[in-house]
């Protein structure tokens, strides 16, 4: 899988995409992640990428031409399955979308900034618009990092134990059950007996029961 990310602030993506599971996936050649600096496509001697909006109003808008040139350049080498614009007015992201995206070959993510991007890029290039929740971020980079992390960990072979992805919260529309590790008794705080019983069927039953209880209490909308 290849994930290309266009950003005006590429530094924001360095750390989140260079650690742990995403790094492991890159090392195993299961994913290639390219960060493209929009400033490389800036106009004139100022390398301009944004301008004030027509009609007036506060806030800068990413201009059509740098984005157009950047996307065109990338499309010379790559055919994208989806061109995704990260924006608070997009469809709210969830695990089902992550699962579907993890099956794609090549993705292009576009991070907006300031007031957003010129609408003509959305009309002519963008195939999906995604928000990560009902709050406003300064830019799409952190959202792009979240998408990338959630997608990459689902690519077959990235996690050692595929079970651990399949049993995540949300994967079956249920929240995960509580988990414990050693010691079995910490200052009198005890691990539930059933988990120490070695009885697989009882453990599975307990976990499902806890998942249902948790989901009912915290996220009844999922049931
Ligand atoms: Cl994808 N971008 C921005 N700027 N803010 C957001 C968002 C995206 N999702 C939620 N808030």
Image (cartoon, rainbow, N blue to C red):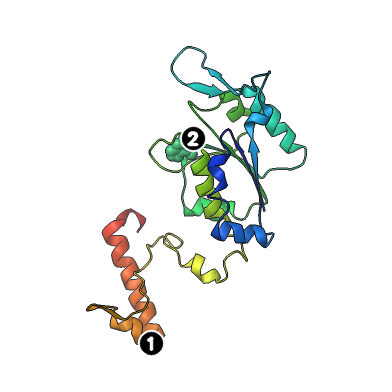
Tell me the SS state at disc 1.
loop
In this view, the residue in front, 33 or 215, is 33
What is the spatial separation of the Cα atoms under label 2 and label 1, in whole angstroms?
49 Å
Q: Identify the residue at image location x=65%, y=57%.
A: 26
Q: Does residue 102 sit above or below 117 in this rendering?
A: below
Numbered tag placed on residue 199 in the rendering: 1
Query: For residue 125, which quarter of the picture?
Result: top right
In screen coordinates, is 188 left or right of 60?
A: left
Q: Quadrant of the C terminus?
A: bottom left
The x and y percentages for residue 181 are 37, 76
Number of numbered discs visible in the structure rendering? 2
* Mark 2 CB near ligand 1 (8 Å cut): yes
Name the residue carrying label 2. 139
Numbered tag placed on residue 137 in the rendering: none
Tell me the SS state at disc 2.
loop
The x and y percentages for residue 75 are 73, 37
Viewer can see residue 90: no
The x and y percentages for residue 198 are 39, 87
Viewer can see residue 141: yes
Instruction: Look at discs 2 and 1 and give the one toward the viewer.
Output: 2
Q: Does residue 221 sit above or below 129 in this rendering?
A: below
């Amino acid at each position: 899988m290849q994930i290309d990310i266009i950003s005006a602030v590429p530094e924001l993506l360095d750390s989140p995409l260079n650690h742990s599971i995403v790094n492991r996936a890159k090392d195993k050649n299961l994913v290639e992640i390219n960060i493209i600096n929009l400033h490389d496509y800036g106009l004139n001697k100022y390398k301009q990428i944004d301008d004030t909006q027509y009609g007036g109003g506060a806030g800068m808008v990413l201009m059509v031409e740098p984005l157009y040139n950047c996307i065109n350049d990338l499309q010379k080498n790559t055919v994208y399955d989806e061109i995704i614009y990260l924006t608070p007015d997009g469809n709210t992201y969830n695990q089902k979308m992550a699962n579907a995206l993890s099956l794609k070959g090549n993705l292009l993510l576009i991070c907006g900034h300031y007031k957003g991007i010129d609408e003509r890029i959305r009309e002519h290039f963008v195939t999906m618009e995604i928000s990560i929740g009902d709050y406003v971020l300064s830019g799409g980079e952190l959202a792009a990092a979240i998408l990338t992390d959630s997608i990459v960990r689902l690519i077959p072979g990235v996690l050692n134990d595929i079970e651990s992805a399949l049993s995540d919260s949300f994967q079956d529309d249920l929240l995960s059950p509580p988990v414990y590790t050693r010691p079995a008794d910490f200052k009198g705080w005890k691990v539930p007996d059933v988990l120490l019983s070695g009885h697989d069927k009882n453990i599975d039953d307990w976990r499902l029961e806890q998942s249902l209880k948790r989901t009912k209490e915290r996220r009844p909308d999922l049931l």
